[in-house]
Image: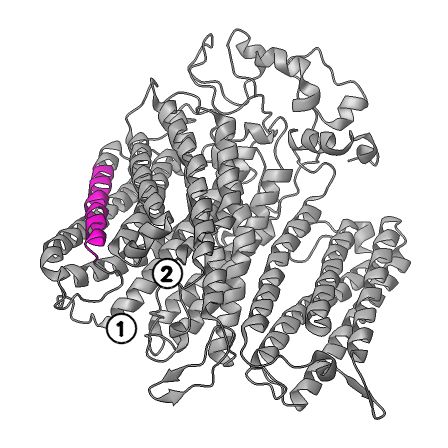
Amino acid sequence: MSDEYNKQNTPIEAQSSETMSGSSGSTTDIDYVRPAELPEQDLYHGHSFITKWIFCQDAKVIGIQYFLTAVFTGIVGLILSWLMRLQLGFPDLVPFMTAEHYYQFVTMHGMIMVVYFLTALFLGGFGNYLIPLMVGARDMVFPYVNMVSFWMFFIAVCVLMASFFVPGGPTGAGWTLYPPQAILPGSPGSGMGIVLMLISLSLFVIGFTMGGLNYLITILQARTRGMTLMRMPLTIWGIFTATALAMLAFPALLVSCIMMTLDKLLETSFFMPAIVQAGEVLDYGGGSPVLFQHLFWFFGHPEVYIVALPAFGIVSDLISVHARKNIFGYRMMVWAIVGIGALSFFVWAHHMYVSGMNPWFGFFFATTTLIIAVPTALKVYNWIITLFRANIRMNTVMLFCLGFIVTFVNGGITGIFLGNVAVDIPLSDTYFVIAHFHMVMGIAPLMVIMGAVYHWFPLVTGRMLSEKLGKWHFWFTFLGAYSIYFPMHYLGFIGVPRRYFEMYDSPYVTSATGMNEFITVAALIVGASQFIFIYNIVTSLRLGKPAGKNPWKANSLEWLTSEVPPVHGNFGEKLPVVHRWPYDFNVPGAKEDYITQTTPPSEVINAEVEKT
Amino acid sequence: MSDNTLNNLPDGFKGMSHDMSSDQTAFKGVQWGKVMMWIFLLSDTFIFSCFLISYMKGRASTVVDWPNTSQVFSLHVGDVPVPLLLIAIMTFVLITSSGTMALAVKFGYEKNRKMCAWLILATAIGGLTFVGMQAFEWSKLIHEGVRPWENPFGAKQFGSFFFMITGFHGTHVSIGVIFLFIFARKTFRGDFDTGKRGYFTTMKSNYVAIEILGLYWHFVDLVWVFIFAFFYLW
C-alpha cells in the first residue's frame, strides 16, 4: 500500500513544489524520494579533549552533559526530600532541622525538581541527544549556540547551589516564590537567597532559549530526505511541542523574576502592597501580589506540560517498540500533544482559586482545565489499545511504561478533583495536592525517564544495563512511590495542611502520625533504591553485555547509525533516506517483525504497511 | 533553494499545507538563521507583552493618581514647555533607522558591498542617537526626582515601570547597535562576499545575516511603537 502510495500520491505527501511543477521526478521508481534541498551541514570537529568533551559542539555530548548536570541537581533534590520526610515522620530526629531550614528545603526541592531536573533532563538531555538522531540530521542547526546553552544552564545551577552557602541560606518562600513574603525579612533566605534564586532562574531562561531555538529549528528545517512531520517518532513531537510551550511560557517567568529582583533590590513596588511589618510602615505600596501569581502561573502551568509532553512522546515510542505493535492512532496522538500544548496556555488560574480572584474567572478556568482531560484521556486509551493483544516484552523498559500509565492515570483523576473550584477549595494546600502533582508530574515522568534510560543506554554507551537490577529498581521505585503518595491522598482528605513544619497538638496528630512515619520510611527506601539504578549504570558502563546494533529491533533512525555509539556527524558518509513511519512492527507479509524507517518499499513489496 | 521556488508555490493555504506535509523543511527556502530569528522574536514578543500587560495592570490598580504624561515628558524650548518633543524626535530617528536597515538588506542582496556597509553604519548611528537621547531623558527625569522607587508627580509605579520597560527596550537597542557596528565592519571588510568564517561559531558568513539582523532591528522599532503609545500617549 505504501509502495503504491509513494508512486501515486507523492505530489502532496513527499514531493517538493520544485519537482512537482518543474522537472519530472522519476515517478515510476517506487523507492523515489525527492533530492536533498540543503547542502551537507558544515560542522566544527573538535580535536582536543576540551573541544571534544567540555566545550563540545556535538549535540550528543551536550545532551549527556545536560543529563549528568540535571541528575546531580536531582540527587540534591532527593536528599532534601529525605530531610523533609524525616522531619515530618520523626520530628526532632534531625538535629539541625529548624522551621527555617524546613521551608528552605521545601522551596529548593520544588524548584530543583521542576525546573533544573525535569525540564533540563527532558529537553536538554533527551532533546539534544535524540532530536538530531531521530530526524536524521548531522547535528543541531546551531552547534555553537547549543554549547553556550548548556554552559548557561551550568552557571544557573552553580548560582542556585551557591545560594545554599550565602548568609541567610537559600530562599524559603515555597517554590512558587509568592511575594510579598518571599522578599520580606521574616521569610528564610529573603536576603541573598531569593536574589540568587531569581538570577539563577533568569540565567536558566536565557540558556534554555538558546537550546530551544536549536530544537525547534532542527525539527522544522533539518530533517532528512523523506522525513515528513507525520513520520517523526512521537518522542520528537513531544519534545517539539514542549519546546514551543517553553519558548512562550518562560518569558512570563523571566519578566516576573526581573520585576521581583527590582522589588527586592531597588524597592520598587510591582508586587508589593502597603505593608506594616513589626509596627513599622515599609516603603512599599500600591503593587499587586496577584499580578505575580498570574505571571508565575502563566509560566507554571505550561511548565507542567513542558515536563509531561516529552514524557508522553517518549513513552509512546517505548510502548510501541516493546509491545512490537504500531502505536494506536498515531495522528490522533500527534494532535493530542499539540492540543494539550495549546490548551495549557488557557488554564493557569486554576492554581489560584483561593487567591481571591473573581469566582466567575475560576469558573472559566475550571472549564478549560476539564477540557484538557479529553486529549489526555485519549492518549491514555491509545496507549492501552496499543498494548491490547500486543506481543509484549515484559522487560524493565515495559515495566516502567506500565508504571507510567498507572501513576499517570492516578494523578490525572485527582487532577479532575482539583480542577473543579468547589472541590478544590477545601482540598487546596493539603497533602491531596502534594499527592496529585507528585503522581502526575513527579512519578509519572520519572517512570518514563527511567524507562528511557534503560531503552537508550545501549545506544549511548554500546552496552546493556542489567535486567535483573533493573527489575529490582523498578519494583522498589514503583511500589515505594505508591506507598509514599497513595496515603497522602487520605492525609489531604482529613485536612492535613501542606508546608507545615510540624503539626504540634492539632487534631491531625493522632490520626496522621502513623501514616507520616510509614510515608517517611517508604520515601527513604525509594530514595535509596535509586542508588541501585546508579550502581547499575556505573557497572554496566564497563561490564554490561555489549549491545551491538539495534538491540531492541526498533525502527527509528537513532538505531541505524553507521557506528554504535554514534560518532560526531551521527550518520556515516550518507544521511539516511526515510520511506515510512517508525511504527511498522509485525506487519503482515513482512519477513521480520519490524521494518526500519530506511527500508525502501521495493524490499517489502508484499507487506501490508500503513500509509505514512 | 533557487530563486523561482517561491513563484512555483501553489496558492495560499494549499501551498502552506503542502510545505508542512513535505519532508526536510517546513519553510521552503528559508535559512535556518532566519527561522531562528522569527521564533526568537515571537518569544521576545511574549516578554514585552508580559511587561506591558503588567504595566497596564499596575497603572489600573494603583491607588495614587498616575502623573500627567504630557507634562512629565515635556521639553522646554526657551521657556515654552513642548509636550512629547524629545520623544517625537527619538521615535523619528528610530523609525528612520529602520528604513536605512531595509535599504541595507536590499543592497546586500544586490552584492553592493559599499552601499550596504554605509547604510548599516547609518542604522547603527541612528540607534546610537536613540540610546543617547534615551539616556538624556532618563537623566532629566532623575534630576526631577523620579526614581524606580519614588515619583514626585504621582504614583511611584510610574517610575518603576518607566525605567524598567524603557531600560529593557534600551538594552535591546544597545545590543542591536553593537551588532550593527560589528556587521558594518564585516561588510566593509568583505566578509559576506568571501564567506569568511566566524570567530566564535566557525560558520561561513553570508549576506542573509544582514537580513536576520534587520528582522531584529525592525522588531525593536515595532516594540518601541507600542511602548511609545502606552507610555507617552495614554
Q: Residue A529 in the image: state x and y as whole percent.
A: 21, 46
Element under disc 1: helix
Identify the secondary structure beneath mark 2: loop
Q: Along the polypeptide, which appears first: circle 2 or circle 1?
A: 1
Q: Which residue is mark 1?
A: A100
Query: At 19% across and 72% down in the image, what residue appears?
Result: A96
How is the model colour-coded? one colour
Tell whether position B40 is magenta. Answer: no
Q: In this view of the protein, can residue A556 be seen by the observer?
A: no
The residue indicated by pointer 2 is A354
Q: Please indicate whether residue A87 sits to the left or right of residue A177 in the image.
A: left
Q: CA distance from mark 2 to mark 1?
A: 25 Å
State left or right for residue B158 relative to residue B70.
left
Specify the subunit that label 2 lies on: A
Number of residues whose C-alpha sits closer than 10 Å to that of mark 1, classed few (under 14), some (14–19) or many (20 or more):
some
Q: Which residues are magenta?
A: A472-495
Residues A20 and A604: in front is: A20
Where is residue B21 drawn, in percent x and y? 64, 29
Is residue A216 visible from the viewing direction of this image?
yes
Residue type for callout 1: Glu
- Tell me the crowding category of disc 2: few under 14, some 14 to 19, or many 20 or more residues within 10 angstroms, Cα based: some
- Callout 1: residue from which chain? A
A478 part of magenta stretch:
yes
Which residue appears at 50% of the width and 44% of the height? A343
Lateral position of residue B52 relative to residue B105, left or right: left
Q: Is residue A605 above or below residue A141?
A: above
Magenta span: helix, strand or loop, mainly? helix
